[in-house]
Amino acid sequence: MDLKDFRLRVGGDMLIKAGIIGGTGYTGGELLRLLALHPEVEVIAVSSRKEKGNKIHAVHPHLRGFYDIEFVEPEIEIFSECDVVFTAVPHGEAMRYVPELYEMGIKVIDLSADYRLSREKYEEVYGKKHEAYIEAVYGLTEIHREEIRKAKLVSNPGCYPTCAILAAAPLADVELVERVIFDSKSGISGAGAMPTDFTHYPNLHESIVPYKITEHRHYYEMEQELRRFQEDIRISFTPQVFPGSRGILTNAHIFLRGELSRDELMGIYENFYRDCYFIRFQESVRLSHVRGSNFVDISIHKGEDRIVVVSAIDNLVKGASGQAVQNMNVMLGLDEKTGLDFPPLFP
């Protein structure tokens, strides 16, 4: 029996109890924002060693009036009454908490990279030993919805892979891709809340900066997921950061095996995403049209030598916390758009 069925038996007024381990960063704050208005959820515990004892609004002033709880230590016992816990901590930290929560029967959604890849690939890519590996469901909801529905542990995808994989998956599914080149640009919030030389305003202002040009860690998620559809797909990926707060825009240059008309291309995409509320097809794509929302906007353009699929997401919502809430909804038997069904901010 899932929580939805249980609530029906007890009169429909039981709220899902949620906890967040790591509530002070951008993803933790965005989870708090989204869950504040979720009709089925009550956040009962949010952790931060540094901010222990301080109110939520001391770190997130925009949430004043929405929460009256304090940050707590990240001790597992504090989260024992939760139905679901989000781990919004740095890579390498989630493995300290996830196994015990998992053994307690609490559903876990991890927003770090600790459970996105196989143990061997994780240790190779992240250069550290995985101390507590558990096989998780990769939480790209539009692709793994049925597995997520049965999962106890979901690993939320990276922001770049979410935007890129969704741009190419329909064509990989029918094994028509010779090669795909992902050219992606992200707002600076993707680098996290801690200031660095890289994110310092004068260093980024009026500039677009390529980084980790051929060796970004998110490449391996793209490879893992797209090769589930087409084993011989060839992938290249280059990330860049622009001086904006939010959003990822990806130009996917897809070289096909054979010719397809634009109508045939649209048919493939529309069929693949036929049950996906958050996928929207547009004539053209802008970051301002998805800002603050869980939508993925996609446009398809046919050229002489390739097609270009442009996709856009808000990196903190569909690229992180919004997708985590979407996954929670699926795991707990709710409509997946619950608490997320609102239009983007514009302009």
Image (spheres, helix red, strand yellow):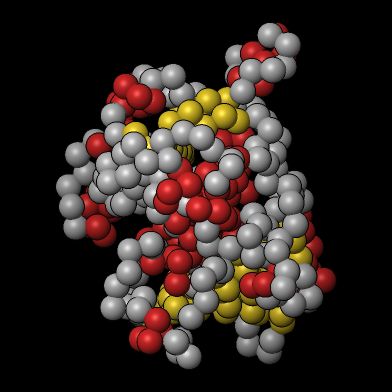
Q: Residue at (46%, 33%) from the top-left corner? A: 69
Vertical order, 166 against 2 (above or below): below
Quadrant position of residue 260 = bottom right
State the quadrant of the C terminus. Answer: bottom right
Percent position (x, y) of residue 343? 75, 57
Depth check: give the residue in front, 168 or 32.
Answer: 32
Q: Residue at (73%, 47%) from the top-left corner? A: 341
Depth check: give the residue in front, 223 or 256.
Answer: 223
Depth check: give the residue in front, 71 or 148.
Answer: 71
The reply to whether residue 224 is visible in this rendering is no
Name the residue furthest top: 9
State the quadrant of the N terminus. Answer: top right
Vertical order, 6 against 41 (above or below): above
Image-based side of 194 in relation to 291, left or right: left
Vertical order, 294 against 71 (above or below): below
Quadrant position of residue 73 = top left
Image-based side of 115 in relation to 346, left or right: left
The reply to whether residue 338 is visible in this rendering is yes
Percent position (x, y) of residue 8? 72, 14
Percent position (x, y) of residue 274? 76, 51
Vertical order, 326 against 179 (above or below): above
Image-based side of 315 in relation to 53, left or right: right
Quadrant position of residue 190 = bottom left
In the rendered picture of this protein, how many numbered marks are placed on residues? 0
Percent position (x, y) of residue 328? 56, 36
Q: Residue at (32%, 69%) from the top-left corner? A: 195
Q: Residue at (34%, 47%) from the top-left corner? A: 89
